[in-house]
Amino acid sequence: MHEIAIAHDIISIIEETLISFPDRSLKTACVSIGEMVAVVPALLQHAYDSLISGTHLDGSKLEITIIPISAVCNSCQKTFGLSEYEFCCPACQSVHIKVKTGNELYVKELIVE
Ligand SMILES: [Zn+2]
């Protein structure tokens, strides 16, 4: 259940950002999470809802965007999508690849009112 730890991190980021806007209340927090972080969106949503319950963030929504894994091949420079357990280039079968996306975890946007 690393979703609880991730929800904690997301809430810390939200709190830090909202310090500058004390008279606004949060409607929606849009977060982007790489596929390799292996988050179950429903569990993250649930963890977020439980953690904000009774706080000033209570009632806000979490909008989760999963970013697929992509990689670039060091041998032929091709960029391609990756499934989690196939770490080789589909064009030249090289295993010298570098992951480009899929590791991220950040708050993309906060919608306040
Ligand atoms: Zn290649």
Image (spheres, rainbow, N blue to C red):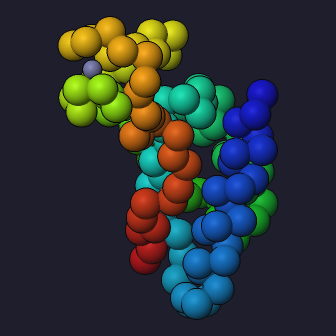
In percent of width and height, residue 75 lies at: 30, 26
The image shows a total of numbered marks equal to 0
Residue 48 shows in this picture: yes
Left/right placement of residue 63 relative to residue 47 reads left
Q: Quadrant of ligand 1?
A: top left
Q: Looking at the rendering, which quadrant does residue 20 occupy?
A: bottom right
Image vertical order of residue 18 relative to residue 108, above or below = below
In percent of width and height, residue 66 lies at: 42, 36
Quadrant of the image containing the N terminus: top right
Q: At x 59% / y 33%, what residue is drawn?
A: 37
Q: Looking at the rendering, which quadrant does residue 76 occupy?
A: top left
Image vertical order of residue 98 relative to residue 113, above or below = above
Out of 72 and 10, give the one closest to the viewer.
Answer: 72
Out of 10 and 92, give the one closest to the viewer.
Answer: 92
In percent of width and height, residue 21 lies at: 55, 88
In percent of width and height, residue 6 lies at: 70, 45
